[in-house]
Image (cartoon, rainbow, N blue to C red):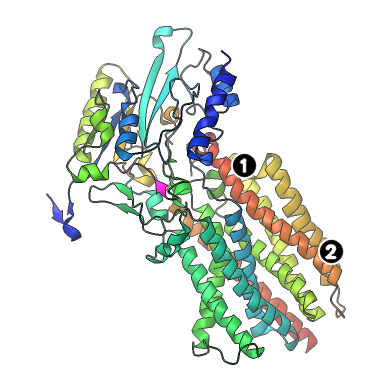
């Protein structure tokens, strides 16, 4: 079902990513494809010493990041695990960056993804500390906030995003979010049948308390912290009512104090 | 090969090549690599509580421009409020305060705007902030507060310039008095408190844990620094000693309340609060803000504030010393709070373990 919006844009189903950690082989093709398609500069060559992760984290010029988690067990070596997760912007239902943006540069597009319009952003940087996942960042050269666009340009032409296209194991799947969720739940059931640990991050767990379901969600075989995914990401705007109340109360108190002092002196001299 | 030197050379390159110093710098320092090698010594079992201690959150790029903006904006808002209060509730002897307050508010509004614009990644797009209004974004609310404050400060300064005979007619004289005064008062209140809300309403633990304190602390610090600035100007412009005493009284009350709130913030913030109250930053905050900025001026001003005698002439030297101390304390407060956010963003445990 597609509903016609202005400028000939049609609203289709919500599109997103399902990233399955149990299928990722850590080839980093997604990182490379993302940089090639979006013409993002390299991060330079540096060894981090953190397993095979030499990218570190998502940044203004790194929109896919493969994390490598090594869990070595000396006593029972066969229980050792090596997990890889291709991290990406979560495209939250209630996005902190979107709420914080004062220019309206950050929008939700017709594919229901969170998109930063590079020609509108003025680089105030308020989206950066407002993102509960530490994704969006201001790039120094362009001076604007940048993050995963979920390949908005490719989607408009009916193509799947570059990372999903390049993924050799289908660890990254792209499609209508509803369909992806159904697939993900089936996959969790299949893994649990094999006696393996599997959780969905960003579908209906505690992590969706503030930010809502994520359009880019994950299947993880361990606790979210292990992948630096916050177990309870906060939506910053929820702190506003208290903060305004306290601030305005203090301002009013100071006004009353000021008025009392000036009036007190006037009475004293009268 | 020694891992620390081998990768140390490589780690310098990305920062230099792309000029992304705050993106990549420090991330792959030789020390970090060596520490990581140690941790991955084959004994890295299950139960990690972070991903190699990499930060979960990103820090804002804000530096001295935003620190100064918070500082100047707070003092300007307080100056405007003092001028209005003195105008409406003061005596004839407070005339100098009304004049100075109105002019400094306009100067402060202009300086704040310049600092805010300079801090933008694309300063030429400042006006993009005025294409929409978003109640959910403190940055948007704040920009409208700043624009309203600057405009109404301009009206008040024009009115003053007309009264002083600097200009022969007031180009904004036709703007009705009541709405202009109301807009000035409301925008001053928002100018004073929204910067605290701006920090509190983020995902940074040390800031959101201070949401019941930071906005009020910024208001009170704005009030005390505003009083300090006006007191110096009273001394310089030959204002009355009684006006000076009124300002000192307000300053002492505001700064003592500020000290109490700061201490309560430390208690309420708990572990994530260490980014602000622990280590070198905590010592700096306590020395310069609580000690130099609050305790010293309070001790110097208290005898005259509490004395029943009618002050004869302004005590210029004491005013200058207390004002300088209060201003340094106010600036260091903003600086410590803004920069604590950077360390808090870099500490994954603060966020993963203490969500709200």
User: Residue A21, image x and y in percent?
Assistant: 33, 25
The stretch of residues the image draws in magenta is A144-150
Q: Mark 2 = which residue?
A: B300
User: Residue B83, image x and y in percent?
Assistant: 65, 78
Badge 1 density bin: few <14, some 14–19, many ≥20, Cα 10 Å: many
Would you say B105 lies left or right of A122 here? Answer: right
Badge 2 density bin: few <14, some 14–19, many ≥20, Cα 10 Å: some
The one nearer the camera, B34 or A76, is: B34
Would you say A24 lies left or right of B40 here? Answer: left
For numbered disc 1, what is the local secondary structure? helix
* For residue B344, above or below residue B230: above
Chain where mark 2 sits: B
* For residue A72, above or below residue B102: above
* For residue A258, above or below residue B132: below
Q: Give the farthest residue toward the bottom.
A: B168
User: Which mark is drawn over residue A157?
Assistant: none
The one nearer the camera, B148 or A76, is: B148
The one nearer the camera, B41 or B211, is: B41
The one nearer the camera, B14 or B305, is: B14
Residue at image coords 23%, 40%: A177
Magenta stretch: includes residue A257 = no
Q: Mark 1 = which residue?
A: B275
User: Residue A176, image x and y in percent?
Assistant: 20, 40
């Amino acid at each position: 079902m597609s509903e016609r919006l202005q400028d000939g844009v049609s609203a289709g189903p919500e599109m997103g990513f399902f990233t399955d950690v149990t299928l990722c082989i850590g080839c980093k093709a997604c990182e490379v494809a993302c940089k090639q398609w979006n013409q993002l500069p390299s991060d330079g060559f540096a060894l981090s010493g953190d397993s095979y992760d030499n990218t570190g984290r998502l940044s203004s010029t790194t929109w896919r990041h493969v994390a490598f988690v090594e869990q070595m067990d000396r006593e029972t070596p066969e229980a050792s695990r090596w997990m890889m997760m291709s991290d990406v912007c979560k495209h939250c239902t209630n996005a902190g960056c979107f709420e914080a943006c004062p220019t309206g540069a950050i929008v939700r597009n017709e594919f229901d993804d969170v998109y930063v319009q590079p020609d509108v952003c003025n680089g105030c940087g308020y989206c950066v500390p407002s993102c509960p996942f530490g994704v969006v960042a201001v790039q120094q050269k362009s001076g604007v906030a940048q993050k995963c666009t979920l390949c908005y340009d490719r989607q408009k032409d009916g193509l799947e995003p570059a990372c999903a296209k390049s993924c050799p194991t289908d660890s990254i799947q792209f499609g209508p979010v509803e369909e992806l969720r159904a697939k993900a739940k089936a996959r969790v059931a299949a893994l649990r049948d094999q006696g393996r640990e599997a959780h969905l991050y960003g579908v209906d767990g505690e992590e969706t308390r503030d930010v809502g379901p994520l359009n880019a969600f994950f299947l993880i075989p361990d606790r979210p912290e292990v992948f630096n995914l916050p177990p309870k990401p906060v939506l910053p705007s929820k702190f506003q009512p208290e903060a305004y109340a306290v601030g305005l109360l203090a301002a009013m108190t100071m006004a009353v104090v000021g008025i009392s002092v000036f009036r007190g002196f006037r009475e004293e001299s009268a | 090969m020694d891992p620390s030197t081998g990768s140390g050379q490589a780690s310098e390159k990305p920062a230099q090549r792309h000029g992304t110093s705050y993106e990549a710098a420090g991330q792959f320092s030789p020390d970090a690599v060596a520490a990581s090698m140690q941790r991955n010594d084959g004994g890295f079992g299950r139960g990690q509580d972070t991903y190699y201690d990499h930060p979960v959150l990103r820090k804002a790029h804000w530096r001295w421009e935003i620190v100064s903006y918070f500082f100047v904006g707070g003092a300007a808002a307080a100056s405007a409020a003092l001028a209005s209060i003195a105008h409406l509730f003061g005596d004839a002897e407070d005339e100098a305060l009304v004049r100075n307050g109105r002019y400094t508010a306009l100067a402060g509004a202009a300086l704040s705007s310049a600092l805010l614009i300079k801090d933008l990644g694309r300063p030429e797009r400042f006006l993009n902030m005025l294409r929409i209004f978003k109640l959910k974004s403190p940055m948007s609310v704040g920009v409208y507060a700043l624009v309203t404050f600057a405009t109404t400060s301009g009206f008040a300064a024009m009115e003053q310039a007309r009264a002083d005979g600097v200009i022969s007619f007031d180009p904004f004289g036709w703007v009705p008095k009541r709405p202009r005064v109301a807009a000035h008062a409301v925008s001053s209140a928002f100018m004073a408190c929204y910067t605290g809300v701006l920090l509190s309403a983020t995902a940074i633990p040390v800031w959101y844990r201070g949401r019941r304190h930071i906005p009020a602390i910024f208001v009170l610090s704005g009030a005390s620094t505003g009083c300090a600035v006006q007191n110096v100007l009273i001394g310089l412009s030959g204002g009355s000693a009684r006006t000076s005493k009124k300002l000192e009284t307000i300053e002492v009350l505001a700064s003592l309340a500020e000290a109490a709130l700061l201490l309560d913030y430390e208690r309420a913030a708990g572990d994530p609060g260490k980014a602000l109250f622990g280590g070198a930053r905590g010592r700096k905050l306590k020395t310069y803000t609580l000690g130099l900025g609050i305790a010293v001026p309070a001790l110097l001003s208290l005898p005259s504030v509490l004395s029943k005698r009618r002050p004869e002439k302004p005590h210029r030297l004491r005013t200058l010393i207390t004002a300088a101390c209060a201003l340094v304390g106010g600036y260091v407060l903003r600086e410590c709070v803004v920069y604590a956010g950077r360390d808090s963003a870099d500490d994954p445990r603060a966020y993963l373990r203490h969500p709200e």
